[in-house]
Image (spheres, rainbow, N blue to C red):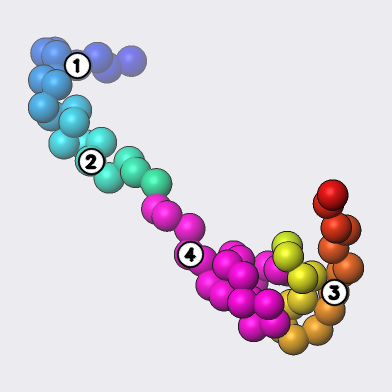
Amino acid sequence: MPLPKRRHSKTRGAKRRTHWKLDAPNVTRCSHCHQPKLPHHICPHCGYYDGKEIITPEETT
């Protein structure tokens, strides 16, 4: 297997890794309860998706 002849510098490795970062998740408002939620997911607060109740969330005490 081929091996590198010389060591790459720290700067060169850092330049290659500049795009290794996480994006913040998109957050939208629920159309029913107006709480923040992920798009294309059931709202964890009210259980609605696309204007219809899909689940009934359990209330935590």
Can see residue 35? Answer: yes
Left or right position of 8 against 57: left
Q: Position of residue 33 (x, y in %)?
A: 68, 77
Q: Main secondary structure of the magenta part?
A: loop
Q: Marks 3 and 4: CB-CB under 8 Å? A: no
Work out how far the residue at label 2 is from the one at label 4, CA to CA, in angstroms.
22 Å
Inter-mark Cα distance, 3 to 4: 22 Å
- 61 part of magenta stretch: no
Residue behind mark 4: 26
Query: Mark 3, residues whose alpha carbon is within 10 Å: few (<14), some, or many (≥20)?
Result: few
The answer to whether residue 39 is visible is no
- Mark 1 closeness class: few <14, some 14–19, many ≥20 residues within 10 Å: few
Q: How many marks?
A: 4
Report the mark closest to the observer, 2 or 1.
Answer: 2
> Mark 4 packing: few (<14 Cα in 10 Å), some, or many (20+)?
few
Assess whether mark 1 and mark 4 are in contact (beta carbons under 8 angstroms): no
Residue furthest to the front: 61
Position of 32 compared to 22: left or right?
Answer: right
Amino acid carrying label 3: it is Ile
* Label 2 vs label 4, nearer the camera: 4
The residue range painted magenta reads: 23-43
**Residue at (23%, 41%) from the top-left corner?**
18
In what element is the residue under mark 4?
Answer: loop
Name which residue lies at 24% across and 14% down: 3
